[in-house]
Amino acid sequence: MKKILLLISILLFTHLVNAQNPSRIVIKGSIKDTAGTALSAATVMLLQPKDSSLVNFARANESGTFEFKNVRNANYILKVSYVGYLPYQQVLSPSASEINDLGNLKIKPIAKELIEVVVKTARAPLTIRGDTIEYNASSFKVPPGSSVEDLLRRLPGIEVDASGNIKAQGKDVKKVLVDGKTFFGDDPKAATKNLGAETISKIQVFNDKSEQAKLTGVDDGKKEKAINLELKEEFKKGAFGKVTVAAGTESRGVLRGNYNRFNKKEQFSILGYTNNINETGVNWNDYGEFKGNNSFNNNDNGDFGFANGGSRYNFDGGDLLNNFDGKGFTNNFGTGLNYNYTFQKTKFSSSYFYNQTRLSLDQFEEKKTFLQNSFFSNTDTTGKTDFRRNHSVAMRVEQMLDSSNTLIAKANLRVSHSDVGTNQSQRYFTDENTLNTTSKIDNSSKLNSLGFSGSLIFRHKFKKKGRNFALSTGLNTNSSDGTENLNSLSRFLNATNVNEQVKALGQLNQNENKATLIKSSLFFLEPISKKMYWESFYNFSTDHREVGREAFNALRNNSRFDSLSTFYKNTINYNRVGTSLRYSFKGVNVTVGLAALRFDLEGKLYGGKDYPVAQSLTKSYDAVTPNISSDIALKNNTYLSLNYTLNVQAPDISYLQPVVNNNNPFYIITGNPDLLPEKSNNLSLYFNKFDPATFSYINLWTEYNSYSSQIVYNQTVDENFVTRTRPENLSGGKNFNVGTYIGFPIVKTKFTLNLNGNASIGNSPTFINGVKNETDNKSYQLGLGFNINPSEKLLMNVSGRLGFNNINYSIEERQNQQIRNHGIDASVKWNFAKKLFLETNLDYKTYRNDRFGFDQNIPIYNCSVRKLFGKENKVEVRLAAFDIFNKRQNIVQMASQNYVTTQRALTLARYFMLSFTYNMKGHADKLKKNGGW
């Protein structure tokens, strides 16, 4: 009995002692070196003792002090890191007082002989070095089977939206590297969606310099956010990947996988997919390395000097990429290979990709077109089948010839095919809602395209520091041939002449197009002093196009349509010479420049391929263009950018060609060989501030554009509502945009908030039946989002968006529009039991246009449960339900020029799916005898 009483007394005493400890406390201290000097900007972290996961973090202020407020009174590991010093670590026990003052924490400089040991043993959850933030992946816990995308969602300062787009410190991430190398081109999603979180050792977020700054070694202040994924050692030397197979209701199915083998010098990856659930696997950004005009992309830009226009180059070969916009139903297949090699002075990357998509689309469109004091409306019911396939090969080599000379070579090859069929039923109504005209359209086309793109960049560094010379040259070619079958039957109900009541069209077009672009640029940089630089540059290009079309009348034994057959040759020569002065010192970069440019245009029109010249055109345009650019890095991670430029843009060659496009008999387009270059004044201001102590940030921007000789499409509409349009030059257009993106933690590492807003005001002039119409477009958007990460087992995201678009038409004020598009999105990922996970998402959108009487609410709810099997969690089984409410449809509301339209299309709705995934882990030991392969 005495022992029992003694035990109860001990328990009561322990409880009373613990009860006296506060539940929430403040932890503070001061970071100094052994000499007593305060170390400002030292990173201080609180870690969980059991697994070293990050609980909270702070940065020492200018006096070296730090403070954690309102933290739970518990056991912690306190860790301090500072560049050039030994990491400091201290175990903290629960405090008896509300303020746990640790006093002065002294850290020691790293002796040279200890550097290697420290690098291997110091595993801080995050380290901040200048503008680079490095995260230790193991400190941010994610469930087994998670992707890199899931891991990024856990990192403070990084956001990933539902589509996989990444922001770091409020800025869009343009590039994701794997061990410093590209991974299937420059698409950030290629790595984050296909690599598993378990393969990553560190994530580094940094400001990537412009290609020109890399070439010259002189900072120009132009930077964009990039991420480097550093693999774990066992994955650098082994193989890993995954395979998923899935089957569902409504005959839905998926098969996809990826396989990777890496060693210190080489990276080899293969991926593939096939499905009928509208996952095309390719979008505009994914295809960056494969587009023909990408030999002069943002990363290997051979157009030296400041940007202020040029020609509109388009080498897409008839838009053969799988640019799926969410409408309809698709069957998809794709596969690709990626190989990278890096050794000493050589960097080589290459890839091959094949993709195909078969689209089936049913769409209904309502459109109102405004004339002076009247309008007409039309409905368009469209059925479409669209098959496209692409073979693409890309290669890049960077060779450091010696310490002074570097050579970069790129090549891209693309072979494409498309087969499209369209059926349309159109009905046109007067402003009194009386049926005026009907039309049945049955068109089909086939197109084959071959495109090649190559570029070469050479850089020489002189012995004098800062003196640089660079030369670039490039060749782009594209050839395409195809056929078009155009068939339509139109009935004009108000026509009094019998011959005008019904019009039939049966037309066969045989098209053969060729395009060749040759480009070259020179660049020279001379240091005037340690802070001043003189830049000189020269740009040249010659763009030659041949457009051939033979048109035949299918209703009259395929006799030739002379008026619609054409053969056109067009050449635009572009020369620009410019110079600028740049001040670059301690984060301040200011450039003032001036360039003189000239366009020489020569066009020849023939009645056919072997016909004599029917019409010729020769024109020249001269312009002088100023440029002012300033990028300033202020104190405390604050950046300011102010830019002004006068852009002079040559017309797209397709605008200049006097070719009639009558694919839609009610909307006929003709080119205009008399077009002048488009000029625009652009003024922009950007402000960014990032606080690494709290990972809060604010981004502000504003931009203004005013146009002279703007290229717009003027329209002439006849009594049967047939619109004939062609591009013309017109001055007076302008656009103003202002926006912000703000993010800050409410509870560090647990609960963050982001707020964004944007306002845009634009004015677009055009002529309708000879009467000038000005369309004023005022658009406002406001967004709010929360990222909630209460534990390693639960992740929640909630975001909302309000969108307002007001459109006013000077030609018909009674038809002014007010379009409203709002939405809310909520998602939850929950590890609710051992190896069991729940993932759910609700996307609720509303669409309103009171003028059309349009009001549509669409809730899309998805839910899935998955379970991992096996000791190493290599097998995953998932049961998923998509669009449980069966409400999905694609809706687009758009207003422009003198019309407003609403499109509704059927798309993939409710289905259920069961999937199996097998994860292949790294096997370095088995590969040693093969040298890592």
Image (cartoon, rainbow, N blue to C red):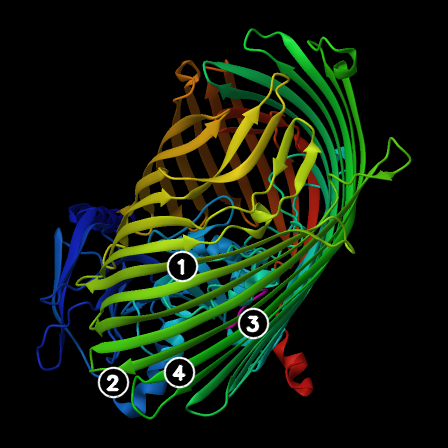
Earlier-in-chain disc, 4 versus 2: 2
Q: Is residue 223 visible?
A: yes
The image position of residue 572, as x and y in percent, is 54, 60
Instruction: Please tell me whether mark 1 sits on a helix, a strand or a loop.
Output: strand
Q: Position of residue 599 (x, y in %)?
A: 47, 60
Dot 1 and dot 2 residues touching (CB under 8 Å)? no
Query: For mark 2, what is the residue?
Result: 110
User: Eyeballing the image, is 824 above or below 515?
Assistant: above
Res 622 label: 1
Residue 116's spot in the image, x, y percent? 36, 86
Residue 451's quadrant in the figure?
A: bottom right
Residue range (magenta): 180-184
- Crowd tier of the residue under label 4, counting other residues whose Cα lies within 10 Å: few below 14, some 14–19, many 20 or above: many
- Disc 3 marks a residue whose amino acid type is Gly
- Residue kind at label 2, given as amino acid type: Ile
Quickly name the residue at label 4. 469
Say which element carries label 3.
strand
The residue wearing badge 3 is 474
Pair 3/2: label in front: 3
